[in-house]
Image (tube, helix red, strand yellow):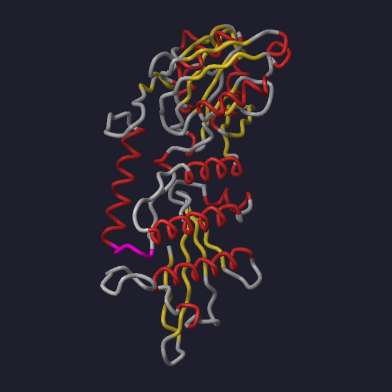
Amino acid sequence: MTTLLIAALVAVKFNGGTPSEFIAAIADATKQNVVMAQGDGKSIPPAEFETSDLDVMSRAIRTQIKHAILPGNEMVLSDQMLSRRLVQTVQFRGGENLEGQVRAQLIERVQAERLVRNQPESGANLSLNIIAIPGSAAKDGKITFKTEKSDAIKPEYLGGIASKPVKVHWIYKDSPIFVNVNDMPELDFMKYVAKAIGARLVAAKEYDFGIDPLEVRKRAITTINAAPERTGPRADVAEEQKAKNFRIASLNALSAAQLNQMLESPGSSITLQLMPRSPLTSLALQRVKDLEQYQRNLPADSRAPRTAIGLLQRVDGSRPATMTVDARFSVRMDIPVVDQNGRSAGSVRIQ
């Protein structure tokens, strides 16, 4: 494909529309099979470029529509995000009362799940029509099919055209995929899909779309960073950013094995002891200090919790503090404390 793009001029003028309409324009210009994935369905803004250089084309797509041509010689694109439904974007924060925090989490979850269920909703970018590829699309071991308008397919539906069973890790099952392929070998098609959603494909007795923990983490962090910024008092905005930075740094500190354990199922989590000289311990210590400073400056009549104030002076050194990271990429700490008489007195949770 690289040779073709260098040898021939590729001209695309896209006036905006659905993902399927955009990849149709790419397929027409490049004469290549194209597969694209998104975290949630979103329309594509206008884009225009004319080039015979793949790198220039890739930069144009990233700049103009915030998607990427993934590394390699395949025309595989992605917004490199996870569904909002999979990433908890509202966390407990020190400046809010518990009732308000729980309500915000419930609203966020309902909104994200509506996107996945294709229910039109105020603020939703694009309501997708999830379809299955008809069996007639597969012939002689090759796939010919294109999604149109607001159509999308999901990885878990690929078993209808595959010559062997299809197994999909839970985190990829609802990933919307847009395709425009012609006479594409079945295995190549499955590889394109795996690359687009960020999975590891093992093709033996079945097509196993297994988890790539490092790629999932990368897409989760992109999704976290894409969340709308908080508005309000400067101190609240700054605290929000520090909480986000702590969350991202904690995720980046996890090993691939730890991420695999954390993402084993939708309800999974991993709990780590915060040992001396551990990078996670340094992150936790700074987070408590930042939260304490923020809480000390809260108005006197604020009902917000002040759990971080004086916390470091009450730590119970005889018991380990822990950090828990769950399958929605949220992070919490449980810090053991002593009472005024120096006796063990439970723990304080920081989220």
Q: Quadrant of residue 72?
A: top right
The one of 231 and 197 positioned closer to us in this rendering: 231
Q: Main secondary structure of the magenta part?
A: loop
The span picked out in magenta is 94-98
Q: Is residue 348 left or right of residue 139?
A: left
Does residue 13 sit above or below 104 in this rendering? above
Identified at 60% across, 8% down, the residue is 31
Q: Residue furthest front?
A: 234
Identified at 31% across, 71% down, the residue is 299
**Residue 305, image x, y percentages:** 33, 70
State how many labels appear. Answer: 0
Identified at 63% across, 73% down, the residue is 276
Which quadrant holds the C terminus?
Answer: bottom left
**Residue 118, image x, y percentages:** 32, 28
Does residue 95 sit above or below 173 in this rendering? below
Q: Is residue 141 left or right of residue 146?
A: right
**Residue 145, image x, y percentages:** 49, 11
Q: Residue furthest bottom?
A: 341
Identified at 36% across, 73% down, the residue is 306
The one of 297 and 285 positioned closer to us in this rendering: 297
**Residue 129, image x, y percentages:** 35, 21
